[in-house]
Image: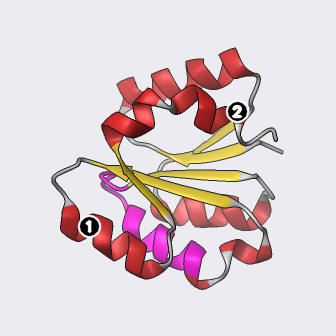
Amino acid sequence: MADVIALIDDLFFLAKVRETSKQVGVSLETAGTGEQLAQAAAANPAALVVVDLNAKQGAIDAVEQLCATGNGGNPRRVIAFLSHVQTDLANRAISAGCREVMPRSKFTQNLAEILRGAKA
């Protein structure tokens, strides 16, 4: 089982996340759509779920589903990130129950620390 499940459809950014996860010793499972993310989260007790709210295939729907079901009954951290100018989307994720929504720049800056947190 992976330590982190991620929905990121930007291939260049996904490569950065994969490389950072290897550097910090965290296993990573990726999902291509919000539906796949929800399925992976239901099947995997990963400590951390990372969602790029700019993913084209149901990212916000997956966040809403994860938060509505209490993360599938697993006490896990869900972090959503997006462009800092997308306040409506950020508010929607917060309203859905996601407690950690951050600008992509902050997520990128703290990526290694965030991923390490999945091992704690």
Hey, which residue is sitting farthest bottom in the picture? 68
Q: Which one is earlier in the sequence, the residue at label 1 or at label 2?
A: 1
- Whether residue 49 appears in this view of the structure is yes
Q: Residue at x 46, y 56 (%)?
A: 33
2 magenta-colored: no
Residue 100 in the figure: left or right of residue 102: right
Q: Measured from the top left, where is residue 49 in percent x and y?
A: 61, 53
Q: Residue 53 bears which disc, if any? A: none
What is the secondary structure assignment of the residue under circle 2?
A: helix
Q: What's the amino acid at mark 1?
A: Leu
| SS of the residue under disc 1 | helix
- Quarter in which the C terminus is drawn: top right
Residue 116 marker: 2
- Residue at (60% x, 66% y) in the render: 38
Q: Residue at x 70, y 32 (%)?
A: 116
Occupied quadrant, residue 20 = top right
Main secondary structure along the magenta-highlighted residues: helix
Q: Which residues are magenta?
A: 53-67
Residue 60 in the image: state x and y as whole percent.
38, 68
Where the N terminus falls, by quadrant?
A: top right
Q: CA distance from mark 1 to mark 2?
A: 27 Å
From the viewer's perspective, tell me whether residue 45 is left or right of residue 34.
Answer: right
Q: Is residue 5 left or right of residue 80?
A: right
Q: Is residue 98 above or below residue 10?
A: below
Which residue position holds label 1? 89
